[in-house]
Image: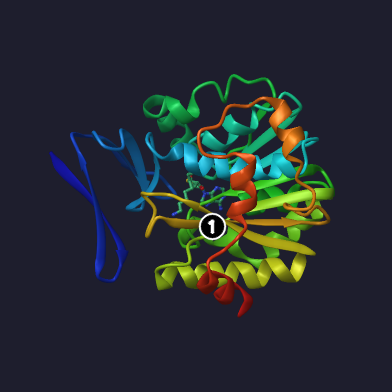
Amino acid sequence: MSWYTEQWSEDCKFSVGYEKHLHSEKSPFQQIDFYEGKEFGTFFTLDGLMMVNEKDEFIYHDMIVHPAFATNPDIKKVLVIGGGDGGTAREVLRYPGVEHVVLAEIDEQVFRLCQQYLPITAAGVEEDARMELAFGDGLAYVQNAPDASFDLILVDSTDPVSVGEGLFTTAFYKECYRVLNDKGILINQHESPYFSEYAENMKKARTKIKQIFPVARVYQYHMPTYPSGHWLFGFASKSLDPLKDADADVWNAIGLKTKYYNTDLHVGAFALPTYVQEALDSE
Ligand code: AAT
């Protein structure tokens, strides 16, 4: 067995054993590696950071998608930015009411390799007639999209370094606001409160989003393979509130079986530890 090791902070590392290094390449955007191990199954990394593995992907993909649909079950038009592994699109496509899903992923190679090595997230996505694959930069995509053309934007992005940086800017959040309709919701990968580098990213995202969206909340989930395991999504919207407007009975009547998300957890996820709430409020 060999070890994949990732730096979580200056003096903290995380390692996962693997049997096979399935693939390694430098795309025009980033270093891509796929591994196969016992504990987490097949996993892939971008620029030396864990993105998706077979064992805990359900947590991330449940939590990026379902809270928005419980708040507005009438979502029809969805834009996924990033998310090249397909897991977010997979969860969105489970809703029969969804009519159109655009995947704006900068690196087509991530998507193609996931089709080959990670069918758990990628299989069936391209074949769904409601899907539109729009490979390219997510910021450029929203800049060119018409006003009020989406019910939901899901920013399933890497951290704000390299290609992911543009997706954490005020310019980007303003464009998201413009392309969302009156009931529009923006969910974004909101980093982590624990290690200082990620906590700084969290605070910067918070400052920008709350200046633009009248409703700007943050919710948490437990992701064992992301630094510290404690991660956040942002919930921003033009009008809908994720607690006041979510209707548990309506969402449960849709009948989706989920392994992490449920409507009790929906409420609990928005209750943040004191140090996290204070860090967010300090912005
Ligand atoms: N579903 C969880 C997987 C990811 S991967 C995030 C994706 O965002 C990558 O495929 C990357 O190529 C894409 N991406 C990065 N920048 C851009 C951009 N500017 N436009 C479009 N796509 C982009 C998320 C993992 C989260 C990890 C947190 N530590």
- Judging depth in this view, the residue of 107 and 90 nearest the camera is 90
Identity of the residue drawn at 80% across and 64% down: 214
Residue 253 coordinates in the image, percent (x, y):
73, 27
Q: Is residue 206 left or right of residue 96?
A: left
Disc 1 under 8 Å from ligand 1? The reply is no
Task: Please indicate, yes or no, whether residue 115 appears anywhere in the rendered image.
Answer: no
Identity of the residue drawn at 44% across and 27% down: 120
Residue 156 coordinates in the image, percent (x, y):
56, 47
Residue 39 coordinates in the image, percent (x, y):
26, 37
Identity of the residue drawn at 59% across and 32% down: 91
Q: Is residue 96 left or right of residue 54?
A: right
Q: Is residue 153 left or right of residue 189?
A: right
Identity of the residue drawn at 45% across and 67% down: 198
Q: Is residue 122 left or right of residue 267?
A: left
Quadrant into which the N terminus falls? top left
Image: 37 above or below 129: below
Q: Which residue is mark 1?
A: 232
Say which element carries label 1: strand
Quadrant into which the C terminus falls? bottom right
- Judging depth in this view, the residue of 73 and 243 nearest the camera is 243
Q: Residue furthest left?
A: 1
- Judging depth in this view, the residue of 265 and 49 nearest the camera is 265
Residue 213 coordinates in the image, percent (x, y):
77, 63
Task: Please indicate, yes or no, whether residue 120 appears anywhere in the rendered image.
Answer: yes
Q: In this figure, what is the number of numbered marks? A: 1
Q: Quadrant of residue 150?
A: top right
Mark 1 nearby-residue class (10 Å; few <14, some 14–19, many ≥20) = many
Q: Residue furthest right?
A: 182
Q: Give the residue type at disc 1.
A: Leu
Q: How is the image coloured?
A: rainbow
